[in-house]
Image: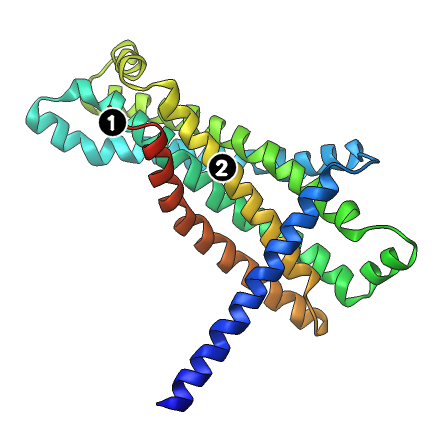
Amino acid sequence: MRELLVGLGGYLNGKLIVIGEWGIFVYWIVRACFKRPFDLKQIREQVDEIGYKSLPIVVLSALSIGMVMVLQLAFSFKRFGARGLVGPVVALSIVRELGPIITSLLVGGRVGSGITAEIGSMQVTEQIDAIRTLGADPIKKLVVPRFIAALISFPFLAIIADFVGIFGGMIMAEMELGVTPRQFLEGVRVEVTFTDFFSGVLKTVFFGLLVTTVASFVGMRAAGGTQGVGRATTLTVVISLVLIIISNFFLTKLLLMLWPVV
């Protein structure tokens, strides 16, 4: 029993040390964001990589989610004669939860794996050490552009996902329930507030921070050649997605305390 407790304590202590190192790493990233020079070209390139190139998967996923929600709810709405509620129910579900969380999971998996693979490859081939030798800061050069680009791209992708998801729901509502687009949008306008929309988008800023910092942190700790890079990439995807799902609960609780649903 004693050996079990000692082993468990050692394991937890090791994980706490890693979390502490990640926290310090985040501090250095935020600090580097305010240091000159500001590489706007790199930031634009990363916005294109993280944001623009993620648009197809976000649009297709959001459209499918909006349409599937109406398909699943159509029977119940018909049964209870509540067709007028389809717009508000679908829109609130999308803008508060499904739009931001699905966008962050899809984009986070794509972006996180790419960041870790790229930085991890540079780490195992000693390119990051070469950057330090030349007197440059690898965090400023490699991590900060991706960090800023994610903070910009994630909210905009979530906004696009919200509108596309609602559009998909509107199409299926007319086909399955006979709810006209005007009726659907009127229900959305009345019931969905700016707070509902803003609270969902705000969470994606934190999700973007999580994905880029975890991916960069794991990439810079990669070791063991190409196999090590592969393990680091897998670890990044798993950790990022789990953290997004867990943190979503706490962020939702916090936002509901700040802006209660009336």
- Residue 121 against residue 55 in the figure, above or below: below
Residue 85 place in picture, x, y as percent? 19, 21
* Residue 89 marker: 1
Q: Is residue 227 visible?
A: yes
Local crowd size for mark 2, using a 10 Å CA cut-off: few (<14), some (14–19), many (≥20): many
Residue sitting at the far left: 80
Q: Is residue 22 left or right of residue 189?
A: right
* Circle 2: element type: helix
* Residue 197 marker: none
Residue sitting at the far right: 134
Q: State which quarter of the image contains the N terminus.
A: bottom left
Q: Is residue 113 visible?
A: no
Give the spatial CA distance, label 2 vs label 1.
21 Å
- Residue 151 against residue 122 in the figure, above or below: above
Q: Which residue corresponds to mark 2?
A: 204
* Circle 1: element type: helix
Q: Quadrant of residue 119?
A: bottom right
Give the residue displayed 79% in from the left and 52% down from the top.
138
Front position in the image: 246 or 48: 246
Residue 20 place in picture, x, y as percent? 58, 61
Q: State which quarter of the image contains the C terminus.
A: top left
Q: Is residue 86 left or right of residue 22?
A: left
| Amino acid type at image mark 1 | Val
Residue 106 place in picture, x, y as percent? 49, 45
| Amino acid type at image mark 2 | Thr
Give the residue displayed 57% in from the left and 44% down from the top.
209
- The first of marks 2 and 1 along the sequence is 1
